[in-house]
Image (cartoon, rainbow, N blue to C red):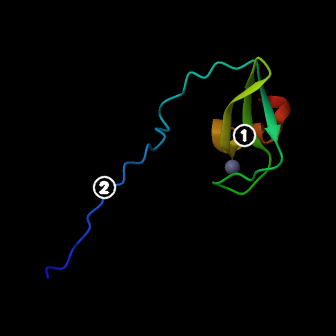
Amino acid sequence: MSSRNAKRRAKIAAPDTSYQPAIIVDAWVPDYGRECENCGQTPCVNGVRDGKVVYAGSMCGVCTWGEAACIDPVNW
Ligand SMILES: [Zn+2]
């Protein structure tokens, strides 16, 4: 029996940090139920359009926009 070496190519859509996604939202709302995957802060960023969450970010405002002031959802 030949040893089976399962080489898997994981295709992961890594976010390109140099690319600003064109997400059209009515408002950015804080989600205090999730912690930032990058720094562990709350809240995470949610984008809402027409009353629905169209963007459920895994990162806080600071990590999403790279601005220290974005720790406060007021600045989103
Ligand atoms: Zn963060």
The image quadrant of residue 21 is top right
Residue at the image position 82 percent from the left and 49 percent from the top: 33
* Viewer can see residue 66: no
SS type, badge 1: helix
Mark 1 neighbour density, 10 Å: few (under 14) some (14–19) many (20 or more): many
SS type, badge 2: loop
The residue identified by callout 2 is 9
User: In the rendering, at what x and y percent does residue 53 appear?
Assistant: 73, 29
Taking the image as shown, residue 21 lies to the left or right of residue 47, namely left
Q: Which mark is residue 61?
A: 1
User: In the rendering, at what x and y percent does residue 18 appear?
Assistant: 47, 34
User: In the rendering, at what x and y percent does residue 61 appear?
Assistant: 72, 40
The amino acid on which the numbered mark 2 sits, given as a three-letter code, is Arg
Q: Answer yes or no: do the residues labelled 1 and 2 have beta carbons within 8 Å?
A: no
* Viewer can see residue 42: yes
Name the residue at the left extreme.
2
Compared with 62, 51 (above or below) is: above
Taking the image as shown, residue 61 lies to the left or right of residue 73, namely left
Compared with 73, 38 (above or below) is: below
Report if the beta carbon of the residue with label 1 is closer than 8 angstroms to ligand 1: yes
